[in-house]
Amino acid sequence: GPKVLQIPSHQIIDMGQMVTLNCDPVSNHLYFYWYKQILGQQMEFLVNFYNGKVMEKSKLFKDQFSVERPDGSYFTLKIQPTALEDSAVYFCASSSTVSNERLFFGHGTKLSVL
Amino acid sequence: QQKVQQSPESLIVPEGAMTSLNCTFSDSASQYFAWYRQHSGKAPKALMSIFSNGEKEEGRFTIHLNKASLHFSLHIRDSQPSDSALYLCAVRRGSALGRLHFGAGTQLIVIP
């Protein structure tokens, strides 16, 4: 079936550095999402993105976070600067429409901030 | 803020048994209810969804929704070892542009 690819699977960085998480969504999908999961807790919505714009974001989407999808390439989540509490697994998802609520998720990127 | 809770946290059943997983939500304006399944180290994958009260069956899986009780459930008939996974329930308000609220999950183990 359709797959969402996330790169890298694991990223280790020092606090204060910048990190970019990459997501290759399903090719004909138009809506893109990032979710955050801290170890042992539930997945929490961060942001969704459509037509080059952030449509909705949660309180977890701090000012240090940004998303973009330049020229139909990777959908990226950038954190600059990183903090210790940013350590989590970040899941990317995509869907073809908003009304079709089936989200296709990637395997996640585990971010470890030291 | 929507609260989504799942029970039980974990469940061990023998192969062939009926498995029942529960999900409660707090926002009575919720309009979309879904179950996702996540095998270890894999991506969460949508299983089934429902919009209106009642039941929906797909193969061995049945989803049941009772909006008045703020509760929905997933029932797996003739459970198989391949069903062993983390099951996540998800809820959305009508206007939330795909913003799903997930539960923490039920870890299901089906023993051969």
Image (spheres, rainbow, N blue to C red):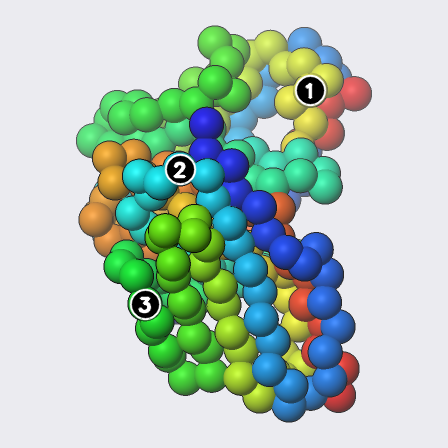
**Where residue A6 appears, x then y in whole percent?**
52, 45
Q: Nearer the viewer, residue B32 or A32?
A: B32
Which residue shows up at 67% across the image and 81% down it? Answer: B81
Residue type pointed to by label 3: Gly
- Comparing labels 1 and 3, the label whose residue is closer to the camera: 3
- B30 is higher (above) or lower (below) than B23: above
Quickly name the residue at label 2. B27
**Where residue A90 appears, x then y in whole percent?**
57, 36
Q: Residues within 10 Å of mark 1 (few under 14, many from 20)?
A: few
In which quadrant is the N terminus of chain A drawn? bottom left
**Where residue B75 appears, x then y in whole percent?**
51, 74
Q: Chain of mark 3?
A: B
Please say if the residues under marks 1 and 3 sit with CB atoms less than 8 Å apart. Answer: no
* Occupied quadrant, residue A37: top right
Residue type pointed to by label 2: Asp
| For marks 3 and 2 on the same chain, the one whose residue lies earlier in the sequence | 2
Query: CA separation, marks 3 and 2?
Result: 18 Å
Residue A85's tag is 1
Can residue A72 be seen here? The reply is no
Q: Chain of mark 1?
A: A
**Where residue A82 appears, x then y in whole percent?**
63, 15
Which residue shows up at 72% across the image and 29% down it? Answer: A112
User: Both on one chain, marks 1 and 3?
Assistant: no
Quickly name the residue at label 3. B54
Residue extending furthest toward the front: B68
